[in-house]
Amino acid sequence: MSPDILPRNFYLGPVLQVARNLLGMRLVHYDQGERLAGIILETEAYDGQQDLACHARVGKTRRNEVMFGPAGHAYIYFTYGMHWCLNCVTGEEGYAAAVLIRSILPVEGIATIAKRRSKVERPEWCNGPAKLTHALGIDGQLNGVDLCDINSPLIIEKGDDIPDQWIQSLPRVGINSVPEPWRSKPWRLHANLPPDWEKT
């Protein structure tokens, strides 16, 4: 394994811990030989079958079976008939928890990302889960890939630590039909980077 790739044990902790620790890490997709990457700025935690906002709440299905597998794998699902969303499976096998990657700051493969996201301004390129998968060329063909495998086209590398004071805890998005307390749990973590962050 490359020393830069996050190891399996990174993903074995509680899902909220993993969601926090992913902030500042570097999401990388090798797309047709080109390396496209971004710094993870926002995540959402989904905590197993008891979490009524989690796909696992209905039990194991063909769609969500990757969530029930080993930690450190990509769970990629299709939504609204047009969008792909990327998640990282966490915790012990069979528990079915995952972290949704909601936003990244693009840092590699900028020309390709700009072309794919040409209809919107740069701040809008990757500030949503479907936006970042479109920008990086991530789709359902990558569902189930091992994020810890050096030969995987999709990996997450070690990045920079983001201080707690830069992070907001907010309710998750798009779950208005989910009952309380799950609807209001502050399990969306957003990093507010200062303008000079890359220089610090």
Image: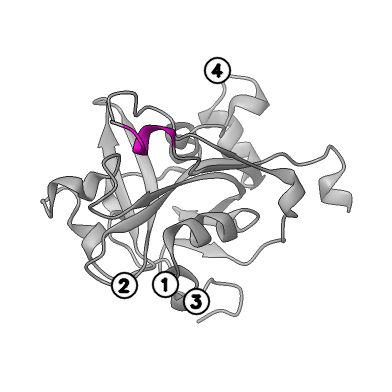
Q: Secondary structure at mark 2?
A: loop
Question: Marks 4 and 3, Cα distance to the nearest angstrom?
Answer: 36 Å
The residue type indicated by label 3 comes to Pro
Main SS, magenta residues: helix
Q: Secondary structure at mark 1?
A: helix
Q: Position of residue 145 (x, y in %)?
A: 32, 63
> Of the residues tagged 4 and 1, which is closer to the observer?
1
> Of the residues tagged 2 and 4, which is closer to the observer?
2
Reply above or below: 60 against 150: above
Question: What residue do we see at 53% from left, 71% from top?
Answer: 6
Identify the mark at residue 12; answer none if there is no mark.
Answer: 1
Q: Are marks 2 and 4 in contact (CB under 8 Å)?
A: no
Question: Marks 2 and 4, Cα distance to the nearest angstrom?
Answer: 41 Å
Q: Are marks 4 and 3 in contact (CB under 8 Å)?
A: no
Question: Marks 3 and 2, Cα distance to the nearest angstrom?
Answer: 15 Å
Reply above or below: 179 against 168: above
Q: Position of residue 154 (x, y in %)?
A: 44, 59
Q: Is residue 192 magenta?
A: no
The residue type indicated by label 1 comes to Leu
Question: Marks 4 and 1, Cα distance to the nearest angstrom?
Answer: 39 Å
Identify the mark at residue 7; answer none if there is no mark.
Answer: 3
Region in magenta: 180-184
Q: Are marks 3 and 2 in contact (CB under 8 Å)?
A: no
The residue type indicated by label 2 comes to Glu
> Of the residues tagged 3 and 2, which is closer to the observer?
2
Question: Marks 1 and 2, Cα distance to the nearest angstrom?
Answer: 6 Å
> Can you identify the residue that label 4 sits on?
119
Mark closer to the chain start, 3 or 2:
3
> Can you identify the residue that label 2 sits on?
92
Q: Are marks 1 and 2 in contact (CB under 8 Å)?
A: yes
